[in-house]
Amino acid sequence: MRNFSIFILLSFLFILSGCISDDKFGLSPYKEIKTFEIAGQAAPTVIDKEALTITIPFNEGEDVSAKTPSNIVISNLATIDPPAGEARNFTAPVLYTVTAEDGSQAQWEVIASVAEPQPQLPNSNFDLWYDTGGYMQPGENAESTIWDTANAGVTIAGPANTVPEDLGNGDLAVKMVSTRAPLLVRMAAATLYTGSFTDGFPDPVDPRSNIDFGTLFSGQPNAFRVDYRYLPGDEYLDGRGNPLPGGDQADIYVLLENRDGDQVQRVATGWYRSNMEVTDWTTLEVPLTYGELPSSDPTFEYANIRAGEAWAPAGTRPTHITVVFSSSALGDDFTGAIGSELWINNFELVY
């Protein structure tokens, strides 16, 4: 009987500890917003715990002047003001104050992001660049830009290989050069993409693991257009330095995706890959194919969905867009020609 009583007591303590896991045994200092949802939102909420911002995407034309949150989850024993069931005008950012049990407070900014009817990506003419202290990056500053490069990894032991190119009269383009890698691998392809390069030392086996691709987006363009030049390097080699037939290839593509947690569905695909030398500035327009790519599509082999992804059902609206430019299409495998040069300018989504 005594053992049974001890078992009951331990079970009770275990359940109790599970209920108060984030406040432990003193007055809780926790004041997080863990979930914030509004009925009718177009995509999952994005919560930035460091910046204390919450972004909720809505489709174009959505009236957000009197929206009532449908689900707010905050830290145990904390309170929130305004209350969860109160309608607010989200045409401008709304401040929510979360007060922890110990009296400390955090002020969260909730932003209803209503899509434009035919949205373009910010700084898609690439005229804005900021100085990181060691190299230049596209955007007004690190906090607001949607564009990133692999410069953070390349500059560990060498110069940046994605840089601004001044065309005159305030017009800047992007110049990307596949360079000889000073450490561990043969070469480093230059890239520009929507997303961010993650913290930590680059993975020499899988460079993509250091990149979070994509940015929030809910438009439905028919195609994309970009000005470009491409000069492939002389020696097209695999990752071990063995000669390959053909030549290096520029990679330029757009993926529209619907993301919900870890689930990724491909909504549309537009992909251009070519080893053709283009010495003069040329305008390229690539259509977006919505739905599953047929096996007869020339891009099917490399543009197909990746493991763990799925094709989105017809009519699915995207939540994210991934745009990628690379001076060597197979640079992930350290395959390509050192010296391949890709310039791009004036990226535009076509509706």
Image (spheres, rainbow, N blue to C red):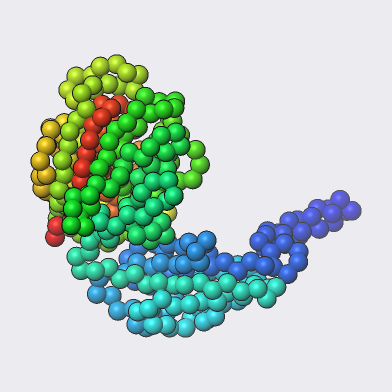
33 is higher (above) or lower (below) than 289: below
289, 115: nearer the viewer: 115
| Outermost residue to the top | 242
Residue 83, percent from left and from top: 52, 81
313, 208: nearer the viewer: 208
Residue 152, percent from left and from top: 42, 43
Residue 211, percent from left and from top: 40, 44
257 is higher (above) or lower (below) than 144: above
Residue at (17%, 37%) from the top-left corner? 230
Residue 275, percent from left and from top: 16, 31
Left or right: where does residue 154 sit relative to residue 276?
Answer: right
In the rendered image, which quarter is residue 142 located in? bottom left
Left or right: where does residue 277 sit relative to residue 60?
Answer: left
Q: Is residue 113 visible?
A: yes
248, 104: nearer the viewer: 248
Residue at (14%, 60%) from the top-left corner? 351
Q: Is residue 35 visible?
A: no
Residue at (46%, 37%) from the top-left corner? 156
| Outermost residue to the right | 2
Residue at (51%, 66%) from the top-left corner? 52
324 is higher (above) or lower (below) than 126: above
In the rendered image, which quarter is residue 314 located in? bottom left
Left or right: where does residue 167 sit relative to residue 238?
Answer: left
Label count reads 0
